[in-house]
Amino acid sequence: MATLDTDTIAAIATAPGRGGIGIIRVSGPNTKSISQSITQTVLNPRYAHYGDFFETENNIKKSLDSGIAIFFPGPHSFTGEDVLEIQAHGGPVLLDLLLTEIISCGARLARPGEFSERAFLNNKIDLAQAEAIADLIDSVSEQSARNAFRSLQGEFSKKIQTLIDALIDLRMYVEAAIDFPEEEIDFLADSKVSNDLKAIQEKLQEVFTQAKQGALLQEGMTVVIAGKPNAGKSSLLNALSGKDSAIVTQIEGTTRDVLRETIQIDGMPLHIVDTAGLRESPDIVEKEGIRRAWNEIENADRILLVVDSNEEKEKVAREGEKEQPTAMLAKLAPELGKQLNRLDHITVIHNKCDLVAKPAQLIDSDPTHIHLSAKQAEGIELLQEHLKQVMGYNEAGEGGFTARRRHLLALEQAEHYLNAGERQLTQYGAGELLAEDLRLCQQALAEITGEFTPDDLLGKIFSSFCIGK
């Protein structure tokens, strides 16, 4: 576990730019003396003092600005240390002058996320709550903001702690039976172990489902629109985003770079990526666009393979058969089969259905086929519902919370250890191996709240925070 610095840290906590109010935060052992130097008075704890802020020039104190100063003595503060909050006028030059004066009084510039990191290390919040602070700031929808606030209040952490407590109780029972064999507890005959294990597995699955929903609402999913030139990819991007984000012409190869739009479907963030048409091209610029398109395709959560229904109709009339999705993919580029070894994250979009007099419809198969007209905005609702379904989206209730990919990985790992422990119990009656799997499961869950977390992971997590938090 990381150790606390003894430095006093300071940072501007408000966003860059001009505003009516700008906030500077200070935390650490020198905070009290800094507050007296800046305000030229002794601040009462947790009391809003209005007055001047001073700077030192040639050993003379000069008034620099006026505003509100609040002193929070540790441990009853956000970081658990002495904390000073200065609310000044929000000009960037003025805030820089105040921050420079604070640093000259014995502080240093805070690293990104260092205030939250100190709160975590001083046991004021756990790691999941600390991450919820950043998630609340970065929320892109109303529901994700509400979920992040519930996580900050400890909703997610309480669910994890409930699981850990149940695991500890089961571990105590199992390990007691191992250490005191004279009690003659038979693991196979005693239903308590199997019943408790089953209950923990069910609870873990419930939390995992909620966490996936929380991660989806926070991070959204990336949908890449791919296909041949002139299939209507840019028109589909415009239809989904509800605006003319991409230039649409009859000229093949109009889109030469990656275009991105972020929209919301019932509160779910959707990151849509339009790509250059996939084909062989001698044009250097278009070739670079196609290369970038493949990079996006490889990292997509979902691929919308757009084909021209009019072109399909002509091909069927000419050759008497419809091209299969695998054949479509193979013809787009020879290397596609090597890069995408599965079809379970591809949806085939038959665009321009209005030109072949076909109704908008969804055909549930493997892969899913959707007939629509991007230009006429017919069938877009079908596509939106399909995207919600494939990502497992459900409208979040009051008990939702935010989650991150690392949380999902930890929950998956915990589930793996529980399942392994169940096999040790039912197939081999091996109490010692069951106890070890339960210990590993507990450790995986404890990584979510930070009870067992490597220092390098802590550094990576807090470095993604904004300065001043």
Image (cartoon, rainbow, N blue to C red):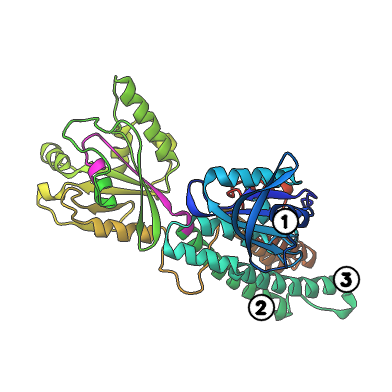
Mark 3 highlights which residue? 179
Mark 1 highlights which residue? 40
Dot in front, 1 or 3:
1
Residue lying at 89% horizontally and 74% vertically, measured from the top left: 180
Dot in front, 2 or 1:
1
Mark number, residue 195: 2
Quarter residue 149 falls in: bottom right
Q: Is residue 286 magenta?
A: no
Mark pair 2, 1: CA separation: 66 Å
Instruction: Tell me: residue 190, above or below residue 231.
Output: below
Mark pair 2, 3: CA separation: 21 Å
Residue lying at 63% horizontally and 60% vertically, measured from the top left: 51
Element type where label 1 sits in the image: loop
Q: Residue 382: horizontal and vertical position, in percent?
A: 26, 59
Task: Left or right? Give the position of 342 relative to 30.
Answer: left
Report the magenta residues as a range: 218-235
Element type where label 3 sits in the image: helix
Q: Is residue 233 magenta?
A: yes
Quarter residue 167 falls in: bottom right
> Closest to the observer: 179 or 292?
292
Mark sitting earlier along the chain (2/1): 1
